[in-house]
Image (tube, coloured by chain):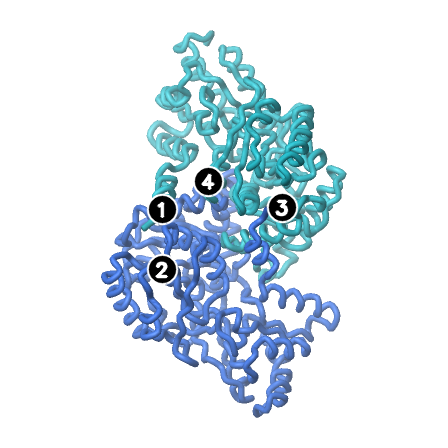
Chain colours: A blue, B cyan
Amino acid sequence: MIDQKLVAWGHSGNIIREIAEYGAEQAKIVGAENVYNFTIGSPSIDPPACVFETMDALRASVPAAELYSYAPAPGLPEVREKAAAYLTRSFGLKYRKQDVIITCGTSTALAVMIKVLLSCGGRAMSFAPYFMDYRYYVESVGSSLTVCPTVADSFQLDLKAAERMLTPDTMLLILNSPNNPSGVVLRREGLEGLARLLERKQAEYGHPIYILADEPYRDLVYDGQEVVFLPAIYKNTIYCYSFSKSMSLPGERVGFMALPPELDDYADIHAAALAVIRSFGYICVSNMWQRVGIECLGATSDISVYKANRDRLYSALTEMGYTCVYPDGAFYLFMKTPEPDAGAFCKRAMRENLLLVPGDSFGTPGYVRLAYCVSPAVIERALPTFRKLAKEYGLRG
Amino acid sequence: MIDQKLVAWGHSGNIIREIAEYGAEQAKIVGAENVYNFTIGSPSIDPPACVFETMDALRASVPAAELYSYAPAPGLPEVREKAAAYLTRSFGLKYRKQDVIITCGTSTALAVMIKVLLSCGGRAMSFAPYFMDYRYYVESVGSSLTVCPTVADSFQLDLKAAERMLTPDTMLLILNSPNNPSGVVLRREGLEGLARLLERKQAEYGHPIYILADEPYRDLVYDGQEVVFLPAIYKNTIYCYSFSKSMSLPGERVGFMALPPELDDYADIHAAALAVIRSFGYICVSNMWQRVGIECLGATSDISVYKANRDRLYSALTEMGYTCVYPDGAFYLFMKTPEPDAGAFCKRAMRENLLLVPGDSFGTPGYVRLAYCVSPAVIERALPTFRKLAKEYGLRG
C-alpha cells in the first residue's frame, strides 16, 4: 500500500542525527563532559544581540493578532523588499521585492526549486563532497543526482570532470560554498570557468542550465576569503540564503531565495515555485521570525569563537599527523581517516565517546566531518583522544 | 522546461489572499474602517496569556544555543511525549510519544500524509464544502480529489452519497469538523455510520481506507456541541491538530499529527512520513514555538468574542432574509447568496467594500464564506451594507 522506497528512506534515518542521539544517551551514562560530540552543525554561540532586541521591540509595538498572523505565502512584502535591497546593496545586482521568496531556511528553497526545475524531467548535478539531503530532494521527484568529483585534497572544482559529466538532460547544478562538510570556499577562477562551461553547454543543449547557490555559510569565513556571488557571474543562478547559521537560529527556519530578474523562464519558474510551496503545505514562514531575521540581516553571532576553534583543531590535528582540508569557512573540518574505511574509524572513535560523521554520507569516502561549532573546552578535552587514535593508527600522535 | 500545470497553479493564485490584498489596498484609499474584510481566517484575538508567559520563561531558562537549535525532524521528544499524554488524557485513547509527529500546522500534516497514502496510487475523497488546499495536496502527487456531496443546507454527512462515490481506489478521506468554510460540526450519528461503511468497504476492497481528521478548529465550539474524536470510532484515522486557531498563532506554524498504535500498516506509514517530511525540506518545526505551544495545549484565546460575533451576525443576517447555515464552531459563517452566482454576488459586495469569499472555492457554489474573526465593530459597520444588498436582491433587508 505504501511506496517501499519511501519506507526504506524513512528507516534509513539520518546518520548525523543518529550519532548525535547516541551521544546524548551516552552523556547520561559517562557524563556530558566525557562525550566529544562533533556531529551536529547547530551553532554553539548566541544569536547577535539584534535578534533579542528586535523580538522585544516587535512584541512592544506590533499587535499580537498581526505579529503572529499568517504571512503571505512568499513572505511579508516589507521583508521581501528589505532582502532585495540588501542583496542589491551588498552585491551590486539589482533585485526587486517580487524576486525574493522567504523560505524555511535554504533546505525548503532547494527542495522547492528542485521540484520546479525537474518538473519536466532531467537530472541534477552536485560536487563531492555534497550535503546529503540534496539526494533526497532530487530522488523524491523521481530524478537522480549526478555527483561530479572535485580536485583531490583541495575540493576545488574540476572543470574537466564537470564537462565530462554534463549531459543534455542536466537541468540544474547545486553549488555549496562555503561547503558543508569540507569548509572549503570555491575560488573565483573555478567558478568563472564553470560559468563559461555552462554557457557553452546551454547553447549546445538548447536549454537553460540553472545553478542553485546553497549559501547558508556565506557570512562564516575567517581569513577574508572571497565568497563569489554566483548570480553576478552566471545569470541563471537562484541564490539561497538562510539565517540559520550566521544568526544562530537554525531551529527557527528562516531564509530566502532570490531569482534574478533576467533569469531564463523567470515567469514560469516564479509561478511554479509558488505552486510547489503551496502543495508542500508550509503556508508561510514564521511571521515573527521573518521580521526578526530581516532586521538583523548582515549581523552575525560572534564568529571569532569558530575561528579560534578552527585554528586550534586544524593545527593540533595536523601536528598529530592527520591530513585535513584547510577550511576557509562554515564550521566544519574534513579530515582524512587513517584507514580507508571512514565508517570503521568512526566506530573506533565512538568507543572513546568521540563522535564524528563518516564522509561516505557526503559522497566522499575516506574522510570524516567534524562540526567544530562546539565550546572550546570540548576541543581541549577531545584532543588526547585524537592523539591516542593517531598513535594507534601509526601516525605521529 | 517547466511543468505548465504547476505554472497555471501558481498563476491561479489564492482567491482568499487576493481578495484580502485588494482589501488592504482599498483601505489605503477609503480608510480601513470603511472596508469590511471577512476573507481571512486569521484569529483576531490575542493568544492566551500562557503563550507569552512560556516564551518569557523559556528565554530566561533555556540557553539560546539550545532554544533556537535544530529540533529533531519529527519534533522534540518532550513535546511529542506531552502531546501524546494530552490526547490520551483528553480522549481516552492510548498514544505513545513515537505516535506523535510535530508539523507546521495541519496543512503540512495533510500534505505529508496525502503523499504517503497515495504513494502507490489511488484517490482521495472529501466532502463539500471542503478547504480548497486539499485539492492542491492531492493533485500535486498526481492523484485526484473526489468531492462527495453532503445533506443540503445542513452539510451533515450523506452516507448514501458516500457509499455511491467510494470506489476500490479510494485510499483516504479527509474530514474537517468544525468545518471550514461552513462552521458545521459533524454529528456523531453520521460519523458512526461512516465508520461502519468504511469498515465494510475495507473488507470488500481488501485494503485499508484511511481518514485524515483535519481538526484545527476542534477547540472553537460555542454551544457545547460534541466534536467526535474520530480515532476512537474508526481506528484507521490520523488525527491532525494545529495551535494556529485556538491559540491565535497561525503564522507561527505549529501543530501535530498522531498515528494510533493500531493503525493498519503503521510501521510503513510512520517511516514513509519521516521520509516525505525530509524530502519537503522543512527540517523541523520552530524549536521555540513547539515548546511554547505544548505548554499551552488546551488553553485557548478568549473565544467568547467569536461566539458573540457569530450570534450577532447569524441573527442579523437571517433577520434580513439571508439563509445561513448555523455554525456550531470555527469562526466561519456560510451564507446562501441571493443570486445563484456567488462570484457575481461577491463582486457586487466588493463594490461596497464588503469582502467575502465565494463558495465555489470550497466546492459549493451559491454560498459565500464570512470569516467572523474580526472586531465586533467591523460587524456593526458592515451590517447596513448587508441590509442594502438584501433589499437590492428583494429580501426583507
Q: Quadrant of residue B305?
A: top right
Circle 2 is placed at which residue position?
Answer: A172
In the picture, the disc for residue B3 is 1
Which type of secondary structure does the marked residue at label 4 adopt? helix
Seen at 42% across and 7% down, the residue is B394
Whole-angstrom CA distance, mark 4 to mark 1, is: 13 Å
Disc 1 to disc 3: CB gap under 8 Å: no
Q: Residues within 10 Å of mark 4 (few under 14, many from 20)?
A: some
Which type of secondary structure does the marked residue at label 1 adopt? loop
Viewer-side label of 1, 3 = 1
Position of residue A381 relative to residue A125, above or below, is below
Position of residue A43 relative to residue B17, above or below, is below
Whole-angstrom CA distance, mark 2 to mark 1, is: 15 Å
Whole-angstrom CA distance, mark 3 to mark 2, is: 39 Å
Q: Label 1 marks which chain's residue?
A: B
Residue type indicated by callout 1? Asp
